[in-house]
Amino acid sequence: MKKHVRIMLVAVLSFALVGAFALAGCSSQPAEEPKQEENTQAPETEPAQEPVELQIFAANSLSKAMEEVQSLYMKDHEGVTFADTQYEASGTLNEMLGAGSYADILITASKGTMDTAVDEGYVDPNTRFDMFTNELVIVTGEGSDIEKSSLADIATGEYKLAVGDDNVPAGNYAKQSLSTTDPACYIDADGKTGADSTGKGGTFEGTPIADRVTQGSSVGNVCSYANSGDVDLAMVYSSDVYRFGGVKIVGTVPADTHKNIIYPAAICAESTNSEAAQAFLDWAFSNEDAIKIWQEWGFELAA
């Protein structure tokens, strides 16, 4: 009887040990990790910048420099291009805007023409600033024997002279200076002289150069008259000598005989790209490489 009980006890203990080992084996299996849901949503990307084409209306004398500056800007600013920039006499640019032409930026060659643009609502006055300065010079053809000249020489009536017409700021400045000679070579409509004159609406009649003046519709035409020998002397900006060539400077017109030569710039009131237009102007006025280009073509940044 005792032997039978002992056999039964051994059997129970053996079964218990087998169960314990089985449980230990099960608990050693690694737990299955929960499956992660697949992300079927495409990653977010920043929207591509819309391409911008800027239309600039600029004074004639800026053409060569502006072309180089625009090319430089497009290299560093992907997505920005320029429409066919319009280079005309500043007064003509205003006439174009008044007739409904579209532009993002206006740069004129005188404060007076920008004043007109502001008064007529062509530009946003809050964006206006003075961009460049220039100087008025007396030139002659490269092959001319004339080596030196002055306002006093012009007042002798000995030389044929070319200046811009009333739509050309360089012509306005020239007439202001000619009103200061003795005797006067230009008669202001209001009897004013020098910087007090607008250089518009007056006459050469009754002066020493009454029949000796040719007026051009652009500074390019004025330079060409001197280059071809049609006239002996011409009055243009110093930057025009770099731009057109074929002429040489024989005199500098005293700055106190005319208004300060300033090129103002502004964003046009109808511009649909005002932010991009302002970014270009800011860059053109501050980038070292751009400034170097302006200076190479005879322009200095206004202080």
Image (cartoon, rainbow, N blue to C red):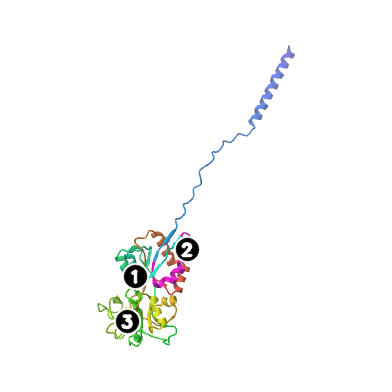
**Residue 176 location, quadrant:** bottom left
Question: For mark 3, what is the residue?
Answer: 178
Gap between marks 3 and 2 measured at Cα: 42 Å
**Residue 90 location, quadrant:** bottom left
Gap between marks 3 and 1 measured at Cα: 23 Å
> Mark 1 or mark 2, which is nearer to you?
1
The residue sitting at the left extreme is: 190
Q: Amino acid at mark 2?
A: Met
The residue sitting at the right extreme is: 3
**13 versus 55 height, above or below:** above
| Crowd class of label 2 (few under 14; some 14 to 19; many from 20; radius 10 Å) | few
Mark 3 residue element: helix
70 in the magenta segment: yes
227 in the magenta segment: no
Identify which residue is drawn at 40% across, 79% down: 224
Mark 2 or mark 3, which is nearer the start of the sequence?
A: 2
Image coordinates of residue 91 in percent, x first then y, are 33, 70
